[in-house]
Every structure is written in C-alpha cells, then in structure tokens.
Image (cartoon, rainbow, N blue to C red):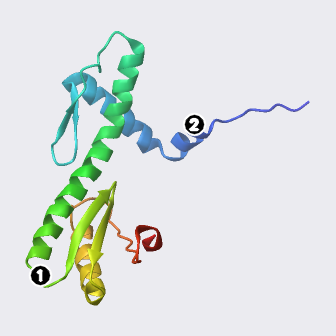
C-alpha cells in the first residue's frame, strides 16, 4: 500500500524561501502595532481595518500591509525616475519625451537620431534611481510602436 502526501505549492515556496515568510509575519506585526506600513522612502499607507474584529476585513488589511511596501517602493522609484528623466531631457539636446508610464515601464517618443543617447540616459537614470541591496536592472526595447518595443 502506498501513501500520497500532496504538498501545496505555497508550502514548498515558503520552505525554499523562509525569509519571505518571516518578512510577511514581521510586516503584519508592524502594521498591527503602528496601524500603517511604509515604503523604503517613508511614504505611509494607513490601514484602518488592520485590527478589525471582522476577520475578512482584517485579513484584507494584512494582505495589503504585506504587498504595499514592495509595490509602493516600486511606485516611488518609478516616479523619482520620471522626475529625473524629465529634468535630464530638458537639459539635453535629445529630441524625446516621456509618453506614459505602465507599472515599472516608461514609454518614450524619440527621434531616430537620438535613440542611442536616450537609451543610455534612461538606463543610467533607472538603474541608479535607488540604492537597494539588489541591483535595479533595466531592459530596453525599441520599436515603431509599443508592441514592437516589447
């Protein structure tokens, strides 16, 4: 007779990356104590339901507490990058402009002659936007439209 013991993917993930579980628990604890979480740059998200008696509301606030510091820090970084790139473009001869932001991606319109200069500028500004324990790596695509650039 054989026994089957299914292991949930999430359990296997936390087994392989125990520091993620520790981060999640520590973040929830801070949120419960302070009522908010912060990005690496100090921007706060207040969680009014973090100590709710309603379990569903409390769990939603806990999930938000875990997610917000990472996603909020990424948002802070892209916003700082856009400000820096806007200033750099104003002070350059590069014929380009920021068209839009999509999550952690920036889309530019650029004259053909300035593609290489803009690519160098964007890579430099994005990779140096924040001092983190892990490097910020940037992939750059070029095309006649957003789809081709991917």
Taking 100 as reference, is 111 above or below it? below
Q: Residues within 10 Å of mark 1 (few under 14, many from 20)?
A: few
Identify which residue is drawn at 41% across, 14% down. Answer: 55
Identify residue for label 1.
92
Looking at the picture, tell me which residue is in the foreground, 74 or 93.
93
Instruction: Say left or right for 147 vs 2.
Output: left
Looking at the picture, tell me which residue is in the foreground, 47 or 32.
47
Q: Position of residue 24 (x, y in %)?
A: 38, 35
Marks 2 and 1 sit apart, C-alpha to C-alpha, by 51 Å
Q: Position of residue 125 (x, y in %)?
A: 21, 71
Q: Quadrant of residue 145?
A: bottom left
Farthest residue toward the right? Answer: 1
Looking at the picture, tell me which residue is in the foreground, 22 or 114.
114
Instruction: Say left or right for 139 vs 87.
Output: right
Which of the numbered marks, if any, corresponds to residue 71?
Answer: none
Q: Position of residue 110 (x, y in %)?
A: 27, 79
Instruction: Classify mark 1: helix, strand or loop.
Output: loop
Identify residue for label 2.
11
Instruction: Classify mark 2: helix, strand or loop.
Output: helix
Q: Position of residue 69 (x, y in %)?
A: 28, 42
């Amino acid at each position: 007779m054989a026994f089957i013991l299914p292991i949930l993917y999430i359990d296997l993930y936390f087994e392989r990356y125990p520091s993620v579980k520790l981060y999640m628990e520590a973040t929830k604890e801070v949120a419960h104590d302070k009522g908010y979480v912060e990005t690496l740059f100090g921007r706060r998200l207040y969680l009014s339901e973090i100590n709710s008696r309603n379990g569903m509301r409390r769990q939603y606030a806990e999930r938000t507490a875990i997610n917000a510091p990472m996603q909020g820090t990424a948002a802070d970084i892209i916003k700082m990058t856009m400000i820096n790139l806007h200033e750099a473009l104003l002070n350059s001869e590069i014929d380009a402009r920021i068209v839009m932001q999509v999550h952690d991606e920036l889309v530019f319109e650029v004259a053909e002659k300035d593609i290489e200069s803009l690519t160098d500028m964007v890579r430099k500004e994005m990779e140096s936007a924040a001092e983190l324990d892990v490097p910020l790596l940037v992939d750059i695509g070029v095309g006649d439209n957003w789809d081709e650039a991917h």
